[in-house]
Image (cartoon, grey):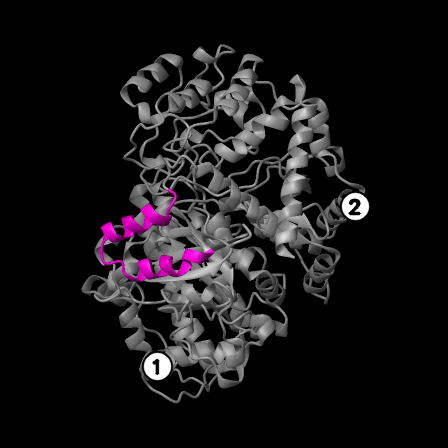
Amino acid sequence: MQFIKMLLFCFISLVMTGVSVASTTESDLYAHKIQPLFDNRCVACHSCFNAPCQLNLQNYDAFVRGANKLNVYNGSRTKAVEPTRIWVDAQTTEEWRKKDFFTVHTSQNPDENLFFRMVHLRVNQPTAKITKQVHESEVCSNSIATEKASETAQPELGMPYGLPPLKAEELATLKEWIEKGAPGPSTEMNKKFHELSSESLKQVREWEVFFNGDDKRQKLVSRYLYEHLFLAHIHFKGGTAHEFFRLIRSTSACEKGPKEIATRRPNDDPGTEKFFYCLVKFPGTVVMKTHLPYEFSPTKLQRYKELFLSGDWKVTELPTYKSAVAENPFIAFKDIPVKARYQFLLDDAQYEVATFIKGPVCNGSMAVNSIQEQFYVFFLAPESDNMVLNKEYADRAKDLLILPGMYGSDVGLINTPGFLTKVIDYRESYRKLRSQELAKLHPGGYTLKDIWDGEQTNNNAVLTVFRHDQNAVVLKGAIGDLSKTAFVLDYPLFERLVYNLVVNFDVFGNVSHQLMTRIYMDMIRMEAEELFLTFLPPEARLAYRRSWYDGILASAKMNYIFPTVGSKEPTGIRFTESQKTKKQLVEKILFYRLNEKVRGPLDALNWKKIDVPENLQKHFKTHGYESEFRKVASIAAGSKTPFARYFPDIAYVMVKNRTGLTTVFTLIHNKEHENISWITGESLRMAPAEDTLTFKEGYWGSYPNMIFSVKEAELKKFTDKIHAIKSDSDYQALVDGFGIRRQNAEFWNYYDELTQIYKQTSPIEAGYLDLTRYDL
């Protein structure tokens, strides 16, 4: 059946391609040929904030905007800069020019056209050796003169950077377009894009009516929802697969044409008392690294009404947007019942956790080097949360839960130490308060019933986070072998994670703003690990904590900013062994607290330390190609089996069977650390002998470093070669035999096939992959 679907998909694609070519006119050349060319050859680098020179090619407006020499990911700037978010911070070419964006379409003569010359340079210098990754090699030529000089000095900078050049017919199409003046899509094509089906329009209006209710309760709820959904790519259940919407604040009524209010952060003052929440169609090509699909449906709308608008809670006065109020959700939304807020986060936990990874920081080490390479995430049941159980406690806690975002995007360098001291002191006071409340509400300690079970139906109840160097991914289920650490999030932790790293974070902020955000994420991580440890016997907790923060400096830091609190609190869970309590707890949660629907499939491919109960053994079986991959999965990279340490962060393995059908697996390198207590010097704190590989079918990384192509008949040879790797030269031999190096003449064929399979197998989740980290 899958093979038939693939053939049908390919046939439809060919037919559509034929129609496009046949119907192409001068006015719609862009829509039918140029944007598809950009999608397939350019957006792999030119999208999001990490696009070289901020040249974004996700749609025509982005191309016209042009380029800018400002590096968005600048962790050392002392002053915040003006935001330059595509489609948000300016609407016209003139407005972008005022923000120092320069055109790359400098002439209709291809020889004098900046954009065309950069592409043509790659054709002229197809074998020019590259030694730097994209983010290390940016040269932002803003004139033909500087471009010509650059071509002589650095011929390797031709586009696509370090990848095979465009084919002759692709270059001819681009040249034709340039000579015609680089026209955009025709009026007809623009109209067709923005038109909604009657069913989509109906749902858009229903949701806009909901968000724009006039009473105070609705206004407060809408503000809360907007601040959590502003990054979402909203799609409608049963709607068009690739039709997504953004939720915005608008100065004009939605039906009259939305006009987005472009504040730095979603919780900044909109500047007008009367505004509207509107759904606008996402205007560009979808890329995986920023794609956060979120479903709207009649069922979801009813769920919102049940959570937020039932009951008799009241709003006496709407919160202001003043500092220390807007940045603190525990103050701003104190009138909304805590249980409703927490349940909202739990309902779509994967989306909420993923926002800090795919949101304002779509790529950046400061954002993700505060987390382990792989860890499980569990959640405290709403009925067990201190804030849910005791309103008086919630009122006391809210003033202690201050977040660094309250100090804004431009934190004075001289003020930073004092601000950090205050944040840390308040957090320590909160930890003591929480411990005291826990002793009152749970004198016998937490039990398994205090772990959220997804109401027996929701598969967001356990998540796995995989970090891939400067980016990460969030998966449903316990994927990969037993993780070194684990989180348990309660409501205050979950909400702070979202507000610290997403709502309050400004990627255009200065170094102090970014530093304080990163340090506070350290605190959230340590608290989440501490809450997990609270379920273990008191005598086991300190040993785990020490093993997670190995090293003299890490230990000293922990004692200073994170001293043990409530370490003698009992646990209500019985353990049969004293040495493997973490393992026992994870197994108890997975197999005795969560049912199959919530837990998801057993990971027979990767689980080796986790013992599956006898009654589930019949389900603990590998399928298809998994049996071969299991031979090299979850094996520590010790002296006898060091192979894992030689792999890049992410690789895609394309296994092709005898009929030509390709199955895609993600190969993830889990790099272990002695500790992750510091922002810098990460390479000095690695534990490579503990590295492992995780395999999972599907697409689980936005930034692949390598693609392997393996025929089904050679899969055993492939895994045997992996197991035999003892050095980097052995790994390079594996790449020579099965890898697709970036200058391989067939590279784009494999990339296109990956993209097509992704769209066909996961139409809602699919987005174009990023190649800025592909191995040199």
Quarter of the image that includes the N terminus: bottom right
Q: Residue at x 31, y 58 (%)?
A: 721
Q: Is residue 300 left or right of residue 552?
A: right
Q: Is residue 767 left or right of residue 708?
A: right
Q: Amino acid at mark 1?
A: Lys
Residue 580 image label: 1
Magenta part of the chain: 712-740
Q: Nearer the viewer, residue 655 or 403?
A: 655
Q: Position of residue 323 (x, y in %)?
A: 49, 47
Is residue 49 among what the camera can see? no
Crowding at mark 1 (Cα within 10 Å: few <14, some 14-19, many 20+): few
Quarter of the image that includes the C terminus: top left
Residue 717 part of the magenta segment = yes
Q: Nearer the viewer, residue 494 or 80?
A: 494
- Per the picture, the main secondary structure of the magenta-coloured stretch is helix
Residue of label 2: 199
Vertical placement of residue 325 versus 102, above or below: below
Q: Residue at x 40, y 23 (%)?
A: 123
User: Marks 1 and 2, how far apart in space?
Assistant: 55 Å
Q: Position of residue 425 (x, y in %)?
A: 35, 61
